[in-house]
Image (tube, rainbow, N blue to C red):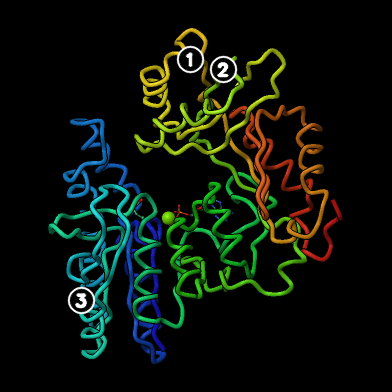
């Protein structure tokens, strides 16, 4: 068998933890497996490095930022290889360029194009554990790139896909994927098996236990992903193709994101072409608009509200004032950064009505006002005031009975 294991920041936070990881890698190898290990930077290191760079420059989408922040993984991969060798094992560290993780040139958010698995198979032939620095790649010009926060998950799943590994184990500081963030919702339950589709939706809507791109890779190449704890031996959560029983689960998880801002343009003319004129310049500048609502018109005008990434809010308003100044002006346009988007996700929503109604009811019982709503086949999202995020998560989680085993949950 061929196993890829990925250890996150807390799992390699100290030399003692790195020794525990080394033991686990050796144990996996001694069971007859070829082992490729992907490591994150030691906990807190990526933030520390980013902080240094930000003292000099605000914009982080920069070649030199990637040179700086990628070093965290270089250190932990070297340390783990040393620790394995110190225990009598054979190991070799490999940086992104040495595994030829070729990416595009979008610094700080690069996407993997290809991986050359030759260096890894050479390690296996020599009986070595391959210890790969996560998060980093190289572009066609030879510049170091990084894959976005949480990117080591994607390195691991992409390597598992390239090697056609039997499993990709993601070791972290929780026991698996839970029905909600266990740090916020104390009654959250571990999920045993979840489909790629649901996991992708949860990851896109704020569940940071897996990076979105890693789930996309897993789904595309059918890599079985096992999310589990590096602190104990219990099995965690398998992320797998959809199984029949999954459709029975109405709500699998509840999640939230706080990184969006809401912009409202009141009283725009209710005629064709207006939305296109507002959103075309935003798209042209690479600003991703998420939710949009437009009210019914009464006097020939309508209010338009939409959300953008909070980090892009200031730029979005500048673009709108510059490119569509006749439709919006500085004194009319308003924004709100203190919002959160809470979502419930579940395969069963495809075939059951009533989940949205119950969600609105639960939020109403807590007197939480809903500012915007959007739905897709397997999720419902509501924008609320940011200060109610934790309250909403706990209320929705318990309101849908997610603290109970699946077969004991009440109908909505
Ligand atoms: P690592 O450093 O190992 O990559 P992360 O911090 O990226 O770990 O991801 C693990 C964290 O994800 C957990 O500590 C937990 O707080 C958070 N999390 C958020 N939502 C969930 C969820 N539904 N299930 C499990 N963990 C979650
Ligand atoms: N070290 C990087 C981060 O903190 C990548 C990772 O840990 O997955 O985002
Ligand atoms: Mg992570």
Name, please, the residue furthest toward the left.
142
* Left or right for 63, reference 300: left
Quarter in which the N terminus is drawn: bottom left
Residue 257 sits above or below residue 134 on the image? above
For marks 1 and 3, the one nearer the N-term is 3
Q: Residues within 10 Å of mark 1 (few under 14, many from 20)?
A: many
- Tell whether label 2 touches label 1 (CB within 8 Å): yes
Q: Kindly identify which residue carries mark 3.
A: 92
- Element assignment for label 1: loop
Residue at position x 47%, y 70% in the image: 220
Viewer-nearest residue: 290 or 11: 290
Q: Residue furthest top?
A: 331
Residue 204 screen position, x and y as percent:
52, 50
Q: Which residue was labeled with disc 2?
A: 268
The crowd level at tag 2 (other Cα within 10 Å; few <14, some 14-19, many 20+) is some
Which mark is first along the chain, 2 or 1? 2
Q: Residue at x 56, y 17 (%)?
A: 268
Residue 280: x and y in percent read 43, 33
Residue 36 position within the rendered picture, expressed as x and y whole percent measured from the top left: 32, 77
Task: Pick out the residue farthest to the right.
Answer: 411
């Amino acid at each position: 068998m061929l196993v890829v294991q990925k250890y996150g920041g807390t799992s390699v936070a100290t030399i003692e933890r790195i020794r525990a990881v080394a033991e686990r890698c050796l144990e996996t190898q001694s069971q007859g497996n070829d082992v490729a290990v992907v490591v994150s930077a030691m906990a807190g290191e990526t933030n520390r490095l980013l902080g240094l760079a930000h003292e000099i420059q605000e914009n982080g989408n920069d070649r030199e930022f990637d040179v700086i922040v990628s070093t965290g993984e270089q250190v932990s991969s070297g340390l783990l290889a040393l620790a394995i060798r110190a225990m009598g094992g054979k190991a070799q560290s490999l940086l992104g360029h040495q595994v030829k993780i070729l990416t595009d040139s979008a610094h700080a958010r690069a996407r993997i194009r290809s991986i050359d698995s030759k260096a890894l198979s050479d390690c296996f032939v020599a009986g070595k554990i391959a210890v790969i620095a996560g998060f980093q790649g190289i572009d066609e010009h030879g510049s170091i790139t990084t894959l976005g926060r949480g990117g080591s998950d994607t390195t691991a799943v992409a390597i598992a896909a390239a090697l056609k590994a039997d499993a990709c184990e993601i070791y972290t500081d929780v026991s698996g994927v839970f029905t909600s963030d266990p740090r916020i919702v104390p009654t959250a339950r571990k999920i045993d098996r979840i489909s790629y589709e649901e996991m992708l939706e949860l990851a896109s809507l704020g569940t940071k236990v897996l990076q979105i791109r890693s789930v996309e890779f897993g789904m595309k190449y059918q890599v079985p992903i096992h999310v589990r704890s590096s602190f104990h031996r219990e099995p965690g959560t398998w992320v797998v193709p959809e199984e029949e029983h999954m459709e029975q689960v109405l709500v699998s998880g509840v999640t939230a994101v706080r990184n969006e801002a809401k912009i409202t343009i009141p009283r725009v003319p209710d005629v064709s072409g207006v939305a296109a004129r507002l959103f075309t310049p935003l798209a042209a500048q690479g600003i991703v608009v998420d939710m949009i609502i437009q009210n019914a018109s009464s006097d020939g005008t309508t209010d338009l509200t939409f959300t953008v990434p909070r980090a892009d809010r200031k730029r979005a308003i500048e673009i709108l004032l510059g490119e569509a100044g006749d439709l919006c002006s500085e004194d009319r346009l308003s924004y709100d950064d203190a919002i959160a988007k809470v979502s419930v996700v579940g395969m069963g929503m495809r075939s059951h009505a009533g989940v949205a109604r119950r969600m609105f009811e639960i939020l109403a019982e807590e007197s939480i006002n809903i500012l915007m709503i959007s739905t897709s086949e397997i999720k419902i999202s509501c924008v609320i005031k940011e200060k109610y995020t934790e309250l909403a998560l706990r209320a929705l989680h318990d309101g849908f009975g997610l603290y109970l085993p699946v077969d004991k949950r009440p109908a909505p």
